[in-house]
Image: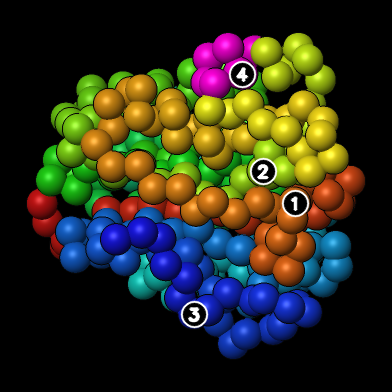
Amino acid sequence: MSLVWRPTPPTGARSAPVWPPLLVAEDLLEHGVVAAFTGRVGGASGPPHATLNLGLRVGDDLRRTLSNRRRVATVLGLAGLPWAVARQIHSAVVLRVEQARLGQGPPEARPPVGDGDGLVTTDQGVVLAVLTADCAPVLLADPAAGVVGAVHAGWRGLADGVVEAAVAAMAELGADPAATVGLVGAAVGGCCYDVGPDVRAVVGDRYPAALATTRTGRPALDPAAGAAQALEGAGVGQVRVAGECTADLEERYFSHRRDHGHTGRQAGLISLIPGGGR
């Protein structure tokens, strides 16, 4: 089964649904894993963070951002569980998350666990979260082994091998790459992400699938395609790609490039369900 919007995503003018639409891997639920990607609608934030901003450090009102995070957690059945986030630095650093070592604070606003762009855990009841606004969010799960991971994959992280590093970190915790499901959420697409020759070369030499051309004929990159190729190259057994462009779908997603840096953040979220077992 692929990723499915629940409820139906916005398709026209921005609406204000009662609950935020989320892109969910529904078949993983029966195996004890919640894995989902958020969009930009269904929250409480005002412009330019309208409405479901989940980033705490983008200039939005903190109370609204925490309310947005609680709304997402409630929809996913994860209310009250602590979120684990990293200070994302566009690297290949992967951090192991242990629930007992998370800092103090509201469940949805614990301090960052460290500097890095990948998170892995075997602990049930902790929510791994990566925040994006054009970079590719990647979620990983080996339900049988009870290991999950989340990756923030921008072009620098891709070039440095962050996706493969996360797969390797999961394997160290007992995951089997061949039994792992890799999910790639919405990212800026090749239709819109024109880059200079140096950036295109450093990513394209490693992941030819990431090479693209914009609608206007300019050299470009497709980070989601690069992340998918990285997952396949790391031996991940199932790879699913949302196939949506954050810059192109203004009604659905935040985009740092489209909105010139003044925007919110969506998230990729994954958790082992407490009591879900293996």
Q: Residue at x 60, y 34 (%)?
A: 223
Image height check: is 77 above or below 146?
below
Instruction: Give neighbour class at mark 3: few <14, some 14-19, many 20+ (Cα, 10 Å).
Output: few
Point out residue 247 in the picture as x, y percentages from the top left corner: 75, 51
Q: Which residue is mark 2?
A: 189
Could you tell me which residue is drawn at 70 percent across and 19 percent down?
Answer: 200
Residue placed at 43% from the left, 26% from the top?
230
Rendered image: mark on residue 7: 3
Three-letter code for the amino acid on which mark 4 is drawn? Val
Disc 2 versus disc 1: distance between alpha carbons? 7 Å
Q: Is residue 204 magenta?
A: yes
- Helix, strand or loop at mark 2: loop
- Disc 3 + disc 2, Cβ < 8 Å: no
Residue bearing mark 1: 247
Rendered location of residue 148, percent (x, y) = 30, 42
Q: Secondary structure at mark 3?
A: loop
231 magenta-colored: no
* Marks 3,1: beta carbons within 8 A: no
Q: Residues within 10 Å of mark 4 (few under 14, many from 20)?
A: many
Number of marks present in the image shown: 4
Residue 185: x and y in percent read 51, 50
Amino acid type of the residue that numbered disc 1 sits on in the rendered structure: Ala
**In which image quadrant can residue 254 be found?**
bottom right
User: In terms of depth relative to the viewer, which is nearer, 156 or 126?
Assistant: 156
